[in-house]
Amino acid sequence: MYLFSTNALLYALVRTALISSIALTDVEAAKCGDFFYNECSKTDSDVRYDPDASIALKDQDPIWSKLEGFWIGNYSFFDGEGIPQASSTYDEDYGYGWPYGYADYRGAINITIIGSRLYQHNYFFYPPASSEFCNENSDPPPGKLNAYGSGACGVNGGFKSFDAFGTSSHEKDGTMHSLPGAGTYADFVNIAYPVDGNTLLYTSTDDSSQFHSQINVFYPDDKTRTRTAYGFDYKSSGRSNPLFYSSLYREQKVTEEEFLKKLEEFSTMYNIPTEDVAPYPMKTTCLKGDWAGGVGAVCPTEDSFCDVDPACSQTPYSGAGPTVNAAKVGIFVTLAFIILIIIGVLLAWKAVRDVRVAARKKFQNAIGGSMVEWSSLNKSPKELLKIFESLDTNGSGLISRSELDHYTKEEGGLSDKELRILFADLDIDGSGGIDFAEFCAFMTMTDRARGNEAFEEDEA
C-alpha cells in the first residue's frame, strides 16, 4: 500500500512537470519577454508580423483622414527652367500635348478612402489657348489638334481628368502603394509616405528613366493644402538640369455641395463644352470616358487591387510569435526533475522504513512477547541464544531464509515484502544466513530504534 501510494504520487508529480514544460510551447496567450520566453526580437515587435494590426489607411496614420474629402484650387505647371509650360498641339496617336494654358488653371479633386483602399479622381479646367498659339497653329498637320474635344482654339477652354488608386500595404506603416499606371508609366512604383502630422510625400519611379515626387503640406490648418511636384529625367541629353517639370497647387477642402458648385463655376469661367467634362463626383468607380486622360482608360479590377491590397493578398510576413527561452526552460525542467528525484527517494525511503518498522514489530511479537519483554537489554546471552536456537530449526548455527519464513508466517504473519526486508536487516554480512552475532546485533538495533520512537512519542 505504501509503495503504491508513493508510485502514484511520483506519477502525478512527473506528469505535472511534463505538462508544464509542454505548455510552454503553447504561445497563444504568452508574450515575448515573459519569464520563460525570449525578449522581444525585431520580428516579435514588428507591426508587420502582427495579424491584429489594422490595414486601414486611416487607422495607420491620421494624415489620411486629412487627405480624404473634396478639394478645389489654383494650379500652375512649369518646365524645368521654372517657366509656365508652353501650350502644344494634341497628338491623337500618342495622346500627349495640351493646347491650353498652364500658368494658372483650376482643379478639383475628390478622394475617398475605404478601409485599405484609396480612390482619387482629378478634374482639371484650363483657360482657352492664347490668340498667339491659335494663330501659329491655325492649320495643324494631320493627327495634331489645336483644341481637344468639341471646342475651338482660343474660344473654349479644355478639360482633363484622370484617376489614381492605391492601397495600404503589408508593411502596415501608413504608406500607400498606388496601382500601376498605364502606358509608359506601367512599370513605375508609386508610394506615398506620411512624413509627419502635416506632411505627405509621394514618389514615383521606374529606377531607370524618371523619378517624380510630390510634397503635400497641410498648413495652417487641415483645410488648407499646398502641393509641390517635381519630375526628373535620368536620361536627359543636352540638358544640364535633369528637372523637366515642376508644379504648384494651392487647395482648400470644401463640402460636397461647394465642390459641385465650383465644378460648374470652372466650366463656365473657361467656356468648356458640357460634353467635354467628365461626370462627377466620382467616389469609387473610375473616370473612363471620351475626355483627355479618360480615353482608353482601363478601370482597375478586383484582381489588380489584390496585387497590392493586404485585404486580399498573402502577407510575406508571418511571425511564429513569442519564442521559448530554451536555457530557462532547460534549467526549469532539470531542477523540477531533480526535486522530483529527491522527493521520490525520500518517499521511497519512508515507505521502506515503514515496512521495516512494521516487520520488526511483527517479528518481536512472533518470537513471543512485547518489544519491552524481549529487549536484548533485559536478556542474558543464554536467553538470546535460546531464542536464536528456536528459529534455527535444523541446528546449523545459521537461520536460513526458509526457516525465518516458516517461523514468521506461522507466528507473525509477515508479508513477503516485510520478510524480505527483515531478512536483509538480520543478515548483516549478506551471506545468506543469520548467525548468532548478527541476531544479537539486530536485537540491539531494534532496542535503539524503539527508544527513538518512544522519544518521538513523548515529544508529541
Image (cartoon, rainbow, N blue to C red):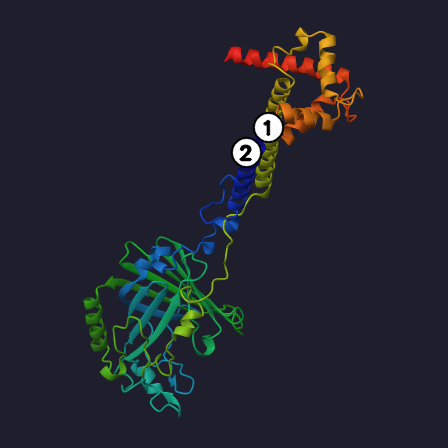
Residue 53 - label: none
Q: What residue type is disc 1 on?
A: Ala
Q: Quadrant of the N terminus?
A: top right
Relative horizontal placement of residue 148, taking residue 317 as reference (left or right): left
Q: Which residue is mark 2?
A: 5
Label 2: few (<14), some or many (≥20) within 10 Å? few
Looking at the picture, tell me which residue is in the foreground, 236 or 458: 458
Q: Is residue 18 visible?
A: yes
Q: Nearer the viewer, residue 177 or 441?
A: 441
Residue extending farthest to the right is 396
Q: Tell me, yes or no, whether the two marked residues, 1 and 2, touch with CB atoms within 8 Å.
A: yes
Q: How far apart in space, not on screen, are marks 1 and 2 (Cα)?
A: 9 Å
**Label 1 SS:** helix
Compared across the picture, whether 317 is left or right of 389 comes to left
Q: Residue 363 appears at what percent x and percent y?
A: 64, 21
Give coordinates of residue 72: x percent, y percent: 26, 67
**Which residue in the protein does label 1 denote?**
351
Residue 155, can we see it?
no
Vertical arrangement, residue 447 with respect to residue 214, above or below: above
10 Å crowding of disc 1: few (<14), some (14-19), many (20+): some
Q: Secondary structure at mark 2?
A: helix
Counting from the top left corner in percent of width and height, residue 161 is at 32, 76
Name the amino acid type tagged 2.
Ser
Residue 436 image point, x, y percent: 76, 16
Q: For residue 58, what is the image quadrant?
A: bottom left
